[in-house]
Each structure stands twice: as C-alpha cells, then as structure tokens.
Image (tube, rainbow, N blue to C red):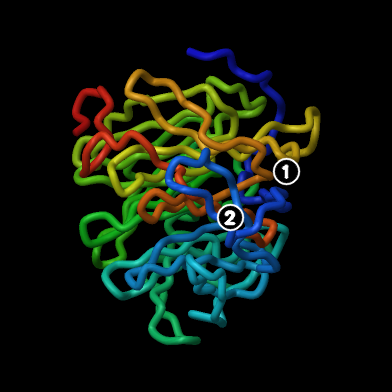
Amino acid sequence: MRTKRPALLVSTLVAALAAALLLPADAAAAGGPHSPPEAQLLVSGLQGTSGSTIGPDGALYVTEADIGQVTRVDRRTGATSVFASGLPTKVIGLGGAIDVAFVGSTAYVLVTVVGADVGGDQVNGIYRVDGPDSFTVVADLGAFSLANPPDYPVDVAQGLQFAFEPYRGGFLVTDGHHNRILRVDRDGEVSALVTLGNVVPTGLAVSGRTAYFAEAGPVPHLPETGRVLAFEPRNPQVRELASGFSLLVDVEFSRCGSLYALSQGDSPGEVPAGSPALPDSGELLRVGDDGTLAVVVEGLDRPTSLDFARATAFITTTGGEVYRVPNAVSGCRGHGGWHGGWPGGK
C-alpha cells in the first residue's frame, strides 16, 4: 500500500464535524471530460448540514440540523428550496436531522441526539415525511437503545445514529456511539444486526444483497483503523475491503459501480472529544480491488456526506456547503456493485 499520512487524534463522536470546504472554485466552471477532478462550490450558507442523498427527481437533498429542515438543491444551478421543515433541531452541538433517504417517492429523515438523555423532548428515530411540515415516526431508535444498551459505559444513552440506508423494505442504521448497525424492518421493529468493537461506524451504502460501511476507528485514529467493510445482512459476517486513511465518514457507489469513500481528515492532536479535524485535510478516495484507497480529490475541509450523479460527485460539509466534483469517476468496471474480492461479495 502507499505511504500513509501520520495518525492524529480526532473525535469518536463524528457527528460533531464542522466548518467549511474552502476550495475557491466557481460551480459553473466545470472542466471538460478529461479535466482532473476538482471540487467546485455549488451551495453555501446552509445551516448544520450533514447527510444528503440524490432524490427521485435527480435533485440533491440535504439535511439542515440547525433549523430542522431538508433542503432541495438543484444539481446544475445550486438553487435551493425548502422540501420539508419542522423537524427536531439540535439540542447540543450535534444531532438533529442528520441524514435523509428516499424509498420510491417517499422521503425519510434520520433524527438523533434530541431525546431526554441530552435534555431534549423529541424522538430519536426515523421520520417519514408526510408533507412539507408533517412527519410520522416509523422507528424509535432511542427507545431501542435505552432498552438494549451496549456492554460498556456510554455518554449518550439513546445512541448517536449517524447514517441510514433503505434495505429490503426497511432500513440499516449505523450508531457511531454504541458501535453497532441496526436493522429496522418494514413494521418499524428495531434489532441489533451487527455489534462492533470501538470502531465508530459511520456512512452506509447498499448494493444488491450486500451492505457496505465506513469506520472512523477508535481514538487515537490511525490511518489503518479508517476502514471500508462489507457484510450480507442475512449472514452478517463483516469483511474488510480497504483501509489506510483516518476518520472515514461515508461510502458511496458511482453509477458505474465503482466504490468510493470519504475521509473527514486529520486531527489537530491532543484535543477533546468532538473536536473537528484539521482544515483542508479531507479526501475523496476510490476503493481499489486490492484493498487500497486511491486519492481522487484532496484538500477537502471536513466533509461528511458523498453522493454521485453520473460521473459527478457531490460532497456535503457540516459547515453549510455543498461541493460538486465533475469527472470524479473514471475507469468504470461495470454495473451493479463493487467487484472487489471479499468472500460473499458480488
């Protein structure tokens, strides 16, 4: 594997990621088909952004935890509009509406760290969007976590659910504080599907029968503990696919089946839990079949979510920015999922 950068301390509570992606590029100035990938500012001024997804209409949808909102972003112009408002907002410096996903034309929002354990009075769970300002809680993740705590002391009793993905009529959910992956069935019943050590699972992706997820790794975050892994929920034996960069916060497939990961960046050193990474140290990475991670774009300032539309990547930061990276995808290897060699993979 290539030489790794030095390991530095970062937070185990990765939802506290903050600040902006400071790359001064004009979103309209997309390069030609053979231009090297470069991050270009598409949107700024959003409030408490974290999770994102491409909706059924082709637009990008982004959560704004500070104001309890899901915002629609035009991928071409960067124009924004309110898709849903009135969701629970942050109670402390992290949490609120943290991720968004669609099942068909119906949107769902993952809400976390808003319960009584942190001084709030809202439900930590999955909310179905019924209208512009109306919602139904379809899974109470906080209640499950209270009734089924991990076997070690935790600071947040109801957990810190970081990301979710639709899966077979229900959802898979990562909990980066209780270190597990939850399964929510179509009736809203919650179960612990994968129980992990102190590895901080973060972003999720699903392809066919296989689920993929990123790990930030324990403190101190070493490059080798920033990992991309996979498992089949019917037989959840976890396999490592790649490692080598600290604080991985998301994984996502391009439209041609290539698997990518997002590194939030390096730590400034001996800092309190919850401190953000060093500015401009995040990276968009391509997962290789040989277990390596290749840098596609570097110098990203604390990104947290990744999406693809054709060959373009869209990167959201918790500082209120959305960037697009034209020509991020190259060398397509087929369709339908990652083709790397782990037993049971595609």
Which comes sooner in the sequence, label 2 or label 1?
1
Q: Is residue 116 visible?
A: yes
Amino acid type of disc 1? Pro
Distance between mark 2 and mark 1 Cα atoms: 19 Å
Question: Closer to the camera, 196 or 4?
Answer: 4
Vertical position of residue 122 compared to residue 272: above or below:
below
Q: Position of residue 289 (x, y in %)?
A: 32, 23
Q: Neighbour class for label 2 at 10 Å: few (<14), some, many (≥20)?
A: many
Please identify the quarter of the rendering in which residue 322 is found. bottom right
Residue at mark 2? 323
231 sits left or right of 143 in the view: left
Say which quadrant the C terminus sits in. Answer: top left
Residue at mark 1? 276
Vertical position of residue 21 compared to residue 283: above or below:
below
Q: Position of residue 97 (x, y in %)?
A: 55, 66
Q: Position of residue 329 (x, y in %)?
A: 40, 41
Give the foreground label among 2 and 1.
2
Please identify the quarter of the rendering in which residue 339 is found. top left
Residue found 61% across the figure and 50% down from its top: 15
Q: Is residue 161 visible?
A: no
279 sits left or right of 108 in the view: right
